[in-house]
């Protein structure tokens, strides 16, 4: 088999990667999008092409010998984007860590190095594949040299060059010289386009031969060539890739070898390329010699004694299900020393020997309930819920590695697999690797004990190690107080809320479902009538045909599969045509029906008869909680449809639901943080802030403000917090951007304190690339310095908004913790059930309504001290809609 060398045009890869990958940064603010794309492209090439020899060819500098001959050469090329510049030092490091040799030569271009190496390979009768998208390199193609455009997955040989340029590869430089090459700033002969250049080269073979035979060329073309003979020869010299530059290398060094794992782990760890770490990390870096299977009573008693006498231990549960409210315990693992862990099986179906649950629970009860023994875990809420269902309450819960990681870096995922890669450079065994997937997947209770032991012990060991790393990091970043006093206590509050669940009325939902089915049927008929035919409303392709081909509506945005028909596009089109208006309503009702109305009855727990949503503490980068299964945040807040769905959330017989909602908390925070005199005065006097703003921006007396103007002012008030642009506000209000810009201008003129505060916040954010809430929660914004205006402005908007959203989230979390403590202390039957945005929902017996109303209002309004009072609205009803 002929040996083949793959020569990678690194510059081409770098710029293609930069423009192909959306802006990315690591937690330190280093832009990484081009690096990520570059790495992905290299790994893909190695995996798919399986080269036996490979090298990466880089440019050393922008200026080469060609600039000495022609100073304007490549002078039209802009400076590299500012967020690409800090990435440059890493490209060579990545190539070298992958053990790909790096070739470069001062005063010459990468193309010349590629040409020289390819020519030497040709002389040795070896093949070369040039990996590039650059047309200039087509001049090197011959029987032994091909080009591979990896982005288009296209190979270019002699026939493809002839198809592109109409000439042989060795004549490509002649065509480029005559026609010019805008990418290299070679102007070419004036008046000679590419077609003419191709025709002349086909006829005369080369520029030299053409210039010797100008008598055979007619008219003005002859005059132009005669007037630019010198330039034509110079341009040919510039366009020709050299094949004899003085580059030293040894072909045997190009042989593909295994990557430098240690160097890659350090590099990918720094860049936070978790996916690549996962793909390239060795299967095991932690020794499993210290992992023990506990099967006998004596071993178990020794372990319990060790746990009692430990200075803290990590534990992990293995169960039969993802839902903690339905999961049965299979086994427990413990680690109280790095590299050492113990697995205790209690529910394996195929184990000939294991301890009984009763024995294990009885012995663990005093250990788990001892608050003096610190407990650690990863996603502990799950484990604590399962244990609580078995009658075990865990006290002394000190640290959750998932929550700690989230506070340090609120973006992204915080599962154990990624944390192990990021902080330990270790690839953990995944759940799927143990239980299988698809048809082969088995329940964990069927896993053999040895595999279960290694898997579970590794999780406990890794968690224990992570805690030792993450806790000092929290302290270093001044996040320890927030972790200890807010996030960890909150986890236990959320656990109780999830276990409490909430009752829904399936009959009420059934009635709504029938109503919606009729509404959707009627909408379908209207849509078909307007369209003039029946079609699949849920098919984007068929919808494209109806909207843009049949009805000739103006396309808004193009995608890979045609013109977009997403929600944003339909909203835009709905301004001028009734069909998209009906489609918007159809999609809205259809989504509500499938997501809530028909789905909620299926979510009722068979034992509790209630729905148990999951509250996610480590998802939203602002610090807000989110919920899933079902997602309660997405039930429309102020629409009739949302109200109908809330009516199905009901209290148990003899009880009521109580809703407590912060009133305008983010605007009150804006007043406190900006210390704007007008805002402070308005909230202290409990004035209507939206009517006041309307008077300011519409420049009229307070009593003359209409309800419509108040509504517009309300939108402006929140637009300021969300950092909305004039265009965004204009879309929301249905007005012209110039008018929206005037509203914003008037707002900042009247509330000068807000304008000054925003300027100060953004100035500091540009400096530190982060913002903090009142309680010290951090969020990083590396893109705030982006050269791309849209990206930069979006980062500024999110940064400003995060301060208010994040602080509001912190405040309601503090209130929840305090209310939870009061409910326990005062032995009330009332239960906290839900947290949605700025609202808390309780289930309360009739006799406790008054007491709970006072308690909740007190704790929520006093959760923090601001320059203006916090205000809470309380509502009570038999269902959530009534209470809200």
Image (cartoon, helix red, strand yellow):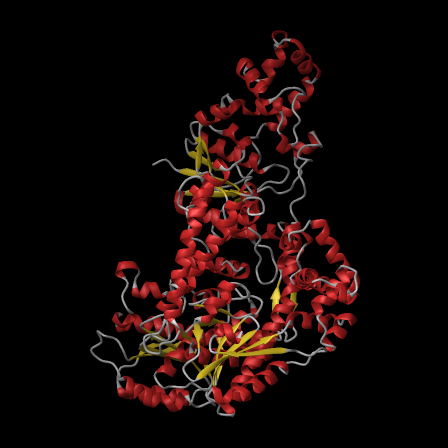
Residue 295 placement: quadrant: bottom left
Q: Which residue is at the far left?
A: 352
Q: Quadrant of residue 179?
A: top right
- Residue 784 versus residue 600 in the image, above or below: above
Which is more toward the observer, 478 or 296?
Answer: 478
Q: Is residue 766 left or right of residue 557?
A: right
On the rendered image, what quadrant is the C terminus found in? bottom right
Front-lying residue, 609 or 105: 609
Taking the image as shown, residue 604 lies to the left or right of residue 109, namely left
Residue furthest top as drawn: 215
Can residue 256 be seen here? Answer: no
Residue 852 drawn above or below residue 37:
below
Asked if one can make out residue 111 in the rendered structure from this viewpoint, the answer is yes
Q: Position of residue 855 (x, y in %)?
A: 57, 87
Q: Depth check: give the residue in front, 280 or 846.
A: 846
- Horizontal and vertical percent for residue 40? 48, 50
Q: Position of residue 614 (x, y in %)?
A: 44, 72
Residue 443's quadrant in the figure?
A: bottom left
Which image quadrant: the N terminus?
top left
How many callouts does the rendering have?
0
Residue at horizontal 60 percent and vertical 83 percent from the top: 857
Residue at 61% from the left image edge and 72% from the top image edge: 808
Q: Position of residue 487 (x, y in %)?
A: 54, 77
- Please tell me which residue is depicted at 36% across the width and 76% down the height of the picture: 325
Up the image or down, 331 lies above or below 101; here it is: below
């Amino acid at each position: 088999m002929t040996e083949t060398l793959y020569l990678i045009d690194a510059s081409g890869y770098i710029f293609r990667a930069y423009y192909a990958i959306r802006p990315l940064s690591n937690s330190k603010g280093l832009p990484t999008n081009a690096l990520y794309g570059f790495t992905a492209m290299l790994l893909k090439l190695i995996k798919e092409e399986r080269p036996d020899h490979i090298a990466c060819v880089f440019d050393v500098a922008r200026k080469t010998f060609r600039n000495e001959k022609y100073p304007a050469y490549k002078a039209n090329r802009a400076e590299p984007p500012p967020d690409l510049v800090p990435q440059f030092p890493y490209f060579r490091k990545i190539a070298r860590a992958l053990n790909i040799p790096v070739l470069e030569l001062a005063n010459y271009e990468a193309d010349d190095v590629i040409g020289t190496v390819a020519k030497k390979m040709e002389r040795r009768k070896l093949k070369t594949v040039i990996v590039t998208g650059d047309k200039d390199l087509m001049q090197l193609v011959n029987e032994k040299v091909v080009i591979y455009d990896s982005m288009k997955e296209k190979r270019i040989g002699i026939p493809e060059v002839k198809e592109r340029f109409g000439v042989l590869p060795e004549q490509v430089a002649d065509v480029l010289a005559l026609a010019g090459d805008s990418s290299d700033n070679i102007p070419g002969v004036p008046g000679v386009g590419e077609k003419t250049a191709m025709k002349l080269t086909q006829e005369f073979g080369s520029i030299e031969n053409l210039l010797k035979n100008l008598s055979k060329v007619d008219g003005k073309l002859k005059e132009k060539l005669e007037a630019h003979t010198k330039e034509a020869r110079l341009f040919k010299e510039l366009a020709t890739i050299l094949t004899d530059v003085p580059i030293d290398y040894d072909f045997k060094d190009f042989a593909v070898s295994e990557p430098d794992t240690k160097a890659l782990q350090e590099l990918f760890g720094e860049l936070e390329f978790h996916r690549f770490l996962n793909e390239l990390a060795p299967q095991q870096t932690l020794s499993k010699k210290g992992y023990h299977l506990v099967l006998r009573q004596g071993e178990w008693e020794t372990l319990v004694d060790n746990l009692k006498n430990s200075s803290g231990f990590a534990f992990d549960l293995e169960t039969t299900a993802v839902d903690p409210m339905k999961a049965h315990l299979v086994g427990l693992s413990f680690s109280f020393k790095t590299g050492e862990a113990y697995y205790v099986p209690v529910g394996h179906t195929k184990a000939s020997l294991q301890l009984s649950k009763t024995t294990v629970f009885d012995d663990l009860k005093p250990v788990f309930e001892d608050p003096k023994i610190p407990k650690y875990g990863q996603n502990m809420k799950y484990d604590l819920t399962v244990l609580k269902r078995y009658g075990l309450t865990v006290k002394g819960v000190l640290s959750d590695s998932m929550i700690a990681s989230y506070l340090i870096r609120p973006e992204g995922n915080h599962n154990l697999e990624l944390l192990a890669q990021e902080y330990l450079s270790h690839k953990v065994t995944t759940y799927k690797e143990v239980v299988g997937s698809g048809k082969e997947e088995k329940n964990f209770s069927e896993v053999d004990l040895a595999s279960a032991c290694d898997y579970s012990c590794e999780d406990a060991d890794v968690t224990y190690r992570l805690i030792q790393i993450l806790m000092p990091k929290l302290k270093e970043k001044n996040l320890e107080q927030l972790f200890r006093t807010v996030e960890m206590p909150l986890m236990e509050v959320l656990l109780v809320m999830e276990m409490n669940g909430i009752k829904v009325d399936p009959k009420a939902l059934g009635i709504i479902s029938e109503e919606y089915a009729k509404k959707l049927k009627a909408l379908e008929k209207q849509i078909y009538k307007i369209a003039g035919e029946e079609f699949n409303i849920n098919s984007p392709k068929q919808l494209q045909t109806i909207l843009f081909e049949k009805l000739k509506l103006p396309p808004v945005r193009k995608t890979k599969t045609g013109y977009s028909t997403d929600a944003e596009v339909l909203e835009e089109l709905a301004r001028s045509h009734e069909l998209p208006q009906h489609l918007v309503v159809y999609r809205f009702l259809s989504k509500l029906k499938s997501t809530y109305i028909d789905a909620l009855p299926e979510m009722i727990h068979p034992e509790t008869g209630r729905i148990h949503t999951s509250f996610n503490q480590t998802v939203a980068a602002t610090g807000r909680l989110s919920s899933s299964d079902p997602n309660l945040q997405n039930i429309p807040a102020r629409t009739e449809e949302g109200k109908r769905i809330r009516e199905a959330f009901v209290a148990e017989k003899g009880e009521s639901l109580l809703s407590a909602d912060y009133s305008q908390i983010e605007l009150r925070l804006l007043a406190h943080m900006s210390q704007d005199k007008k805002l402070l005065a308005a909230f202290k006097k409990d004035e209507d802030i939206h009517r006041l703003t309307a008077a300011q921006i519409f420049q009229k007396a307070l009593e003359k403000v209409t309800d419509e103007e108040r509504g517009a002012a309300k939108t402006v008030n929140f637009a300021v917090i969300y950092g909305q642009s004039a265009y965004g506000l204009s879309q929301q209000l249905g007005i012209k951007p110039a008018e929206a810009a005037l509203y914003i201008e008037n707002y900042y003129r009247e509330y000068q304190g807000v304008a000054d505060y925003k300027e100060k916040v953004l100035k500091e954010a540009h400096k530190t690339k982060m913002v903090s809430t009142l309680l010290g929660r951090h969020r990083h914004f590396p893109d705030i310095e982006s050269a791309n205006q849209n990206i930069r402005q979006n980062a500024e908007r999110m940064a400003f908004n995060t301060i208010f959203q994040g602080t509001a989230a912190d405040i309601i979390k503090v209130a929840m913790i305090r209310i939870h403590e009061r409910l326990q202390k005062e032995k009330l039957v009332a239960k906290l059930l839900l947290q949605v945005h700025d609202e808390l929902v309780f289930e309360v017996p009739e006799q406790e309504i008054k007491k709970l109303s006072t308690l909740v209002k007190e704790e929520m309004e006093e959760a923090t001290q601001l320059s203006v009072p916090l205000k809470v609205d309380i509502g009570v009803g038999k269902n959530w809609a009534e209470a809200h």
